[in-house]
Amino acid sequence: MADVTLRQVKKSYGNLNILHGIDLDIRSGEFIVFVGPSGCGKSTLLRSIAGLEEITSGELRIAGEVVNDVPPSKRGIAMVFQSYALYPHMTVYDNMAFSMKIGKENKAEIDRRVRQAAEILQLTKYLDRLPKAMSGGQRQRVAIGRAIVRNPKVFLFDEPLSNLDAALRVATRIEIAKLKESMPNTTMIYVTHDQVEAMTLADRIVVLKDGHIEQVGTPMDLYKKPGNLFVAQFIGSPAMNILDGRTTTDGFVASDGTVFPLPALGQGESALAWGIRPEHLKLSDSGVPAVVEVVEPTGAETLVMAKAGNNTLSALLRERISVMPGQKVFLAPDLTQLHLFNAKGQRIMRVRNASRVIRQMK
């Protein structure tokens, strides 16, 4: 078992508090991704689990053992960094075998584990090459292979793809996904700022902000049921449309006075903001009047940005649309996909009885 448990973990540098009492349970065999804006504490949290940062207070357990004072080399973890950190004068084989040679493993075991890792990562034909003769994606796979041969309880990835170009990021992300499939009992913790990586790789995502955990859930849970305004706007690209305002008997009145004909909430509830994802906002013959500002065709989809009152809304359309900047249009939200938030920014509900409201609006 390689579960990781954090209880009230804090990290400070003098008077500067970075992590504010993190509570988190990571199950053995999970692929967990930490996401959040720059400076949110995600890399500090990862480095604290690795032992590269000493936690200020709290308790950290790996496989049931308290490891607060255990050095990194004894924690049963292996870390893959943003930079490959390969020895340039060593072959791929020797780079992957180096830690085992230092640990006085026998030659037969070293050879078996290196070749097994090379097979998993499709590096077998490159074992005699030097790093300079390889692409960035291949070098990163060597760095991952160097971690695999250590048979760690927990893999830690610190933005491993951020130095690669777009095509290599996709290819290497696929390799990491295959690696996870081939090692289902190994716990993996991954830090990234890339939402595609988070959504495609994670079993669960941990969203951090200012050293606090905002929400933990599966990618689809966070996408479909964001717990607050921050998560709603952070998860998803293009970002969710958010309007501030208030609910009235006429619908939702944005802060600039624009009225959106949305359903009234249940008794005792009030919304100070509503959100709709761009793919759930369509051009229609009726709805909220708006003026097109930007049209971005991407092939299979078209992103239309239009001004409604003082608010700019994004609609992601699944087809090519012939609209031009300056054109007047109507935007119609899918009311079954509406998100409402209270004064504290917390999600309060999805719209109830949406089908009835839609019929009334027609």
Image: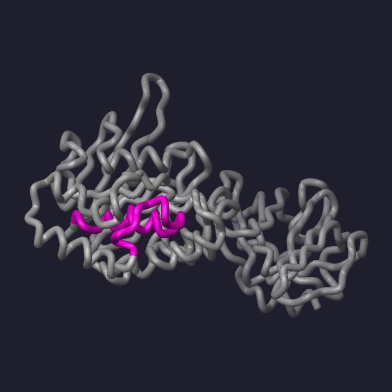
Q: What x and y, as percent, mark residue 46?
A: 34, 44
Report the span colored magenta.
126-150
Question: Is residue 130 found inside the magenta-colored segment of the image?
Answer: yes
Judge by depth and name the residue closer to the eye, 73 or 283: 73
Q: Does 218 sit left or right of 283 as displayed?
A: left
Image quarter in which the N terminus is found: bottom left
The image shows residue 5 at horizontal and vertical percentages of 24, 49
- Percent coordinates x, y for residue 317 in the rendering: 73, 72
For the residue pair 219 and 196, the one nearer the viewer reads as 196
Locate residue 113 relative to residue 134 in the image: left or right. left
Q: Quadrant of the C terminus?
A: bottom right
Q: Is 39 on the left-hand or right-hand side of 95? A: right
Q: Residue at x 50, y 64 (%)?
A: 170
Residue at coordinates 83% horizontally, 55% vertically from top-left? 307
Residue at the (64%, 61%) spot, across then down: 265
**Residue 356: quadrant of the picture:** bottom right
Question: Could you tell me how many numbered marks the image carries?
Answer: 0
Query: Is 285 a magenta residue?
Result: no
Q: Main secondary structure of the magenta part?
A: helix
